[in-house]
Image (tube, coloured by chain):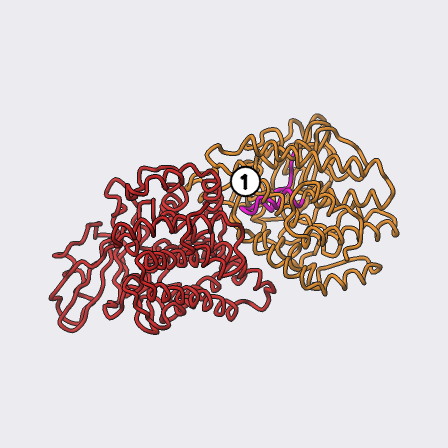
Chain colours: A red, B orange
Amino acid sequence: MTDIETPYRELNLSTVADFAVPFLAERPIRAQEIGDGNLNRVFRVSSSSDSVVVKQALPYLKAAGESWPLTRHRARIECEALLQHGKLAPGLVASVLHFEDPLSVLVLEDLHEYQNWRDATIAGNDLSGVAALVGQYSAAVLVGTVGAHLTGPERAEMRSRFSYSALCLVTEELIFTAPFVNAESNRYDVEITDLVTALYKDRSLRMAAAELRFNFRTRNEALLHGDLHTGSVLARPNDIRIIDPEFAFFGPVGFDPGVLLGNLAMSRLAHQAADREHAASVIDTAARDYWQAFADEAARRWSATEPWFARFLARVLADAARFAGMEMIRRIVGLAHVRDIDSLPPTARFRAQESSLAGGRALVLGGRCPSFDDLWQRATQEETFA
Amino acid sequence: MTDIETPYRELNLSTVADFAVPFLAERPIRAQEIGDGNLNRVFRVSSSSDSVVVKQALPYLKAAGESWPLTRHRARIECEALLQHGKLAPGLVASVLHFEDPLSVLVLEDLHEYQNWRDATIAGNDLSGVAALVGQYSAAVLVGTVGAHLTGPERAEMRSRFSYSALCLVTEELIFTAPFVNAESNRYDVEITDLVTALYKDRSLRMAAAELRFNFRTRNEALLHGDLHTGSVLARPNDIRIIDPEFAFFGPVGFDPGVLLGNLAMSRLAHQAADREHAASVIDTAARDYWQAFADEAARRWSATEPWFARFLARVLADAARFAGMEMIRRIVGLAHVRDIDSLPPTARFRAQESSLAGGRALVLGGRCPSFDDLWQRATQEETFA
């Protein structure tokens, strides 16, 4: 798998075709760059009869430029997480064809017949069954690796293999710190400056964010995806493949559901602000389906020797609500935004941004969240937080 | 330090004197066994002018016999924890003179002029300043290693060096599992059989214990002592040395204060049951002094960049209350008891045992504990839990 004679070099459109030769049935006839992520270069290489995806980790945070260096070790984390999650949730996770450590390159099955779920939610497409499958995936990987269900040695092994990585430090900074302290990496529309200034002055929110950062760091509960937004799901009706788990680590169970529900809530707020009622209701259904499938599948997979499932589910929901709030705030004022909102025309965009900040605050500061309905109402109420 | 030519052998009264020669000013003239713990053999070796303590880990749990094997790796954990805690709380932790890995032996300064704090509390001695010093020790080591204050690499290093060990599995079993499921290792006075039977049938308590076990496993918050009962403190007025941190691991901050307060509460209940009012009030003061000193020192050491100290302290207290409750139950029905209660005459003993079970239940099931006074009242109210 590895070749120590091969030093790291960035692949480009002309070199990636040669690289992909062993993984194609016939000689490559086309290479194109398809990634729009913040961390990697992603290529599709095609022959006349088949194609593969080649994903290479860059030694810096692409969205921030070469001034933000980032270990390429994340390619190995992504590979191991895809394999581990693929075992726990067979058929729901993208398949790895090859991993080349010195180049930090993954070769993946090409899923061109799938649509990115974020694109689908933005378009208002109702892809039946998709949200429930993502909920099943979450339950399979989270309950499948939760500390309560593993033996001591299994836990120790998994904890050390998926230990707190450089990517976790990026998450800490971008989600839990920067949005609350006027960090240089933040960016936001000048029209919402007053809202952002109020955010920076909100001491309760900054305290809550620091406490949540502590939970994120210290609750080593299960092997997370670590960045489960709608763009990490490739979808078609009744079929999904989860991608991009390079942020995988052993962390709090509520984080993945929180990030996903936060992203769905922002999509809902975008449709609402643009008066697209049908599309908004499609998202309402998706969020509920996700949580219901998660709860059902988690119950099914929960160990009979651990007699506290109801308490487990209640704390996952309460944690998810707070993490969703963090995600809804940082996607408005932090480095990385969501296209659902950024693609709106100005007036609707500002309205959705304001709602997202209000929803995020309501989730974080509104006390322990008792139910999914309460979570979803707080997230999407579209009122300015008093 | 290590000698791979030396295979493991159990030291005894005749061989320990030879072993101690290099650590004494003159030739040894006396060796005696002084330990009464559950895990190790502890010797004092004296010359005419000085003495040292030699502590050897045995390859099984001494209290349970050779049928419960236990890794000797704990001697290394103890050594590393003594060094790390000694750096954070200089002057409050026993000094290591030598560590010999193949023999799993620690040579420690002899603290014969100190009294074991458990002996002092049983005798009703009021050792001034001791409880507050233990509180300072707890704050120094817990806040000094809390995830919020360490950089990523420091945390990763400390987490891996003090990872979840075989000793943690013993704690899981003896504190969080066995006392609630009629395990073979349990032992209790036949006179309280009805109480114990009721305990085994208490589904709420078993659920809460399972959830607390999960917290114990997964909240990697700070480098704990791991077994901070009154017998782990050597004391004289205004001076302490902490000993026996072989259970040290990266766990929930509230665990150490909880175990200590649980042990003080049992001591209080013992005095109460024996109508020793003065001794009981000495313990009341000690418990309050411990918590107050912990809170003050924690505030002093808390990082100014983490604006959530009040929330941190509140959650430590709430966690401590629940862990104290676990300790108060397991010390009555589990494998390891406390002399404070076991040394009482029968009627007073059964009364103290009943109170300890009631206090433990009140702490675990009484909802989130809001204050030290509330914790102490629940723990020591001496009423049967309804």
Circle 1 Cα neighbour tier, 10 Å, few/some/many (<14 / 14–19 / ≥20): some
Measuring from the top left, give residue B261's x and y in whole percent.
69, 43
Q: Nearer the viewer, residue A36 or B290?
A: A36
Q: Describe residue A14's horizontal placement relative to residue A205 as left or right.
A: left
Measuring from the top left, give residue A358's x and y in whole percent.
41, 49
Measuring from the top left, give residue B148's x and y in whole percent.
48, 40
- Residue B253 on the magenta segment: yes
| Label 1 residue SS | helix
Q: Nearer the viewer, residue A203 or A306?
A: A203
Q: Kindly identify the residue that appears in the image at 59 percent across and 57 percent down.
A: B211
Q: Tell me if residue A88 can be seen.
A: no
Q: Tell me if residue B339 can be seen.
A: yes
- Residue B270 on the magenta segment: no
Measuring from the top left, give residue A65's x and y in whole percent.
24, 43
How many callouts does the rendering have? 1
Q: Describe residue A221's horizontal placement relative to residue A132 as left or right.
A: right
Image: magenta residue range: B241-259
Q: In the figure, residue B26 lies in which quadrant?
A: top right
Q: Quadrant of the C terminus of chain B?
A: bottom right
Q: Amino acid at mark 1?
A: Glu
Q: In the figure, residue B33 lies in which quadrant?
A: top right
Q: Which residue is mark 1?
A: B80
Q: Which chain does the residue under circle 1 lie in?
A: B
